[in-house]
Image (cartoon, rainbow, N blue to C red):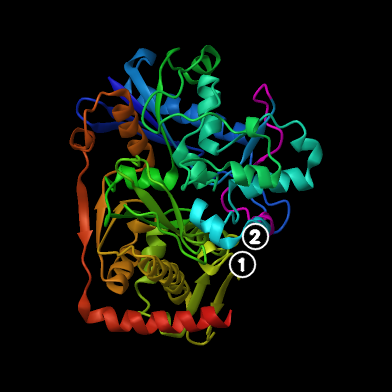
Amino acid sequence: MYLLGLDLGSSSVKACLLDADKNTAVASAFFPESEMAIDAPQPGFAEQQPDLWWHNATQAVQAVMTAAGAKPTDIKAIGISYQMHGLVVTDAHLNVLRPAIIWCDSRAVSLGQRAFDALGHERVLRQLLNSPGNFTAAKLAWVKENQPDVYANVAHFMLPGDYLAARLTGEIVTTASGLSEGILWDFLENRPAEFLMQYYGFDQSLMPPLRPTFGEQGRVHAAAAAEMGLAVGTPVTYRAGDQPNNAWSLNVLDPGEIAATAGTSGVVYGVSEQARFDPQSRVNTFLHVNHSPETPRYGVLLCINGTGSLNSWLRNGLLQGQLSYSQMNELAQKAPIGADGLVCLPFGNGAERVLENADPGASFHGLRVNQHGLAHWLRASQEGIVFAFYYGIRVMEQVGVGVKTIRAGEANMFLSPLFANTLANLSGAAIELYNTDGAQGAARGAGLGLGHYANRTETFSGLQVVRTITPDARVRQAYEAAYEQWLAALEKA
């Protein structure tokens, strides 16, 4: 008996088959093998074709089933993780009307700010816990204002995971957690944010009906089954945005627990039992996957857009693919802490919420051509990403979310000892790395949603710590000095 997890990212779609009884992954795959294209028709725009997501999901599913020798009927449930804050619009027949506007697209910042000002900051923060900002609701408003011919044909708007599930099941539904990610959830009224829909002039019929995060959300229909090689009627029993799902994957469910990821973007995600908000909306609050009115759980999210995207640009753009990521990591460690004064601001992937939606771009400061070599560039880049993390962690502390231990999957930039050690030494937090990823977490979520796992203990029985990085007090002062130099460059920028 297997559980299938899908993780729809902006660089690839991952699939994982989990042996439901042994609670261990038996096969994993991702497509494409090179990163999915992100189209930027104008500066600040970021779009992807939803059909490309479906194509890559199909390939990933077929790859893991072949690797495991699994039959369609062996798959008992499907879980979905997906890139947050995106917008997919379709007609009544599920035909996509325009490319998806994805999470790092910053075109709708002004529309979100306009709503924030018009509705009143105090009211919006009290009810939404966030400014409408550059999230899904504001992106739909951009389509309405700038592409009225497209908007006139919109029958449904969806988050990326809603779309993937709809392609599987034919049912267009969403979750309360998902709506909160799009800034479409009224925390005060505990229902979809009708007042924001009314402000933007959205018809209520455009909003998909709600389903629970854990539980049946539809069953695979015949056309999808034929394309993917699945059995008709296989239930989809879990769905969550990638960062709440990353926290779920790491068993981060209670106050004081912290999850992190450093893929295309970088995220620190803390859990609170109180509905907290940052008056400047530099960090954001959503419904966590295990939230209930009886046991409230809120996820406080810090996002840095330019993390793995910067590292990828260095490798594929600047270095033209001549070094692997592991070789880059080794070379970076040859430069000293602080990179001999070379400072990198890693904000090169759209407007940054932690900077109050400013978009300073990525830049290097203090370059001395007779002193700084490639090792300095690589170290400054990794340190700059960590310093951006730490800048946001200090904002999280201001809204009452402390960081003592950070859990992360052993993947992406956490594969770099320099990156992990710099974060531990600067933050003072121990870092625990686990043998999991978003697709594996989605598979476990499917198992709980199916009822195969009775509780949290059973669900995470296969989760193991791979290694732990503890802070070294002897180098903390050197990292703090480097951070202050970075902060000075940021303030000038």
The one nearer the camera, 32 or 212, is 212
Q: Are marks 1 and 2 in contact (CB under 8 Å)?
A: no
Q: How many residues crowd around disc 1 within 10 Å: few (fewer than 14), some, or many (20 or more)? A: some
389 vs 127: above or below: below
Indicate the secondary structure of the residue bearing disc 2. Answer: helix
Tell me what residue is drawn at x 56 percent, y 26 percent: 172
- CA gap, disc 1 to disc 2? 15 Å
Indicate the secondary structure of the residue bearing disc 1. Answer: loop
Range shown magenta: 92-112
Q: Quadrant of residue 213?
A: top left
The amino acid on which the numbered mark 1 sits, given as a three-letter code, is Asp
**Residue 7 magenta:** no
Q: From this viewpoint, is residue 218 visible?
A: yes
**Residue 96 magenta:** yes
Dominant SS in magenta? loop
Location of mark 2 (residue): 113
The quarter in which the N terminus is drawn is: top left
The one nearer the camera, 141 or 222, is 141
Relative to 401, is 280 on the left or the right? Answer: right
276 vs 331: above or below: above
Location of mark 1 (residue): 359
Q: From this viewpoint, is residue 11 visible?
A: no
Q: How many residues crowd around disc 2 within 10 Å: few (fewer than 14), some, or many (20 or more)? A: some
Residue 48, x across and y down, in percent: 62, 42
Tell me what residue is drawn at x 26 percent, y 71 percent: 428
Q: Quadrant of residue 223?
A: top right
The amino acid on which the numbered mark 2 sits, given as a three-letter code, is Gln
The one nearer the camera, 84 or 178, is 178
Residue 342, x across and y down, in percent: 47, 81
Earlier-in-chain disc, 1 versus 2: 2
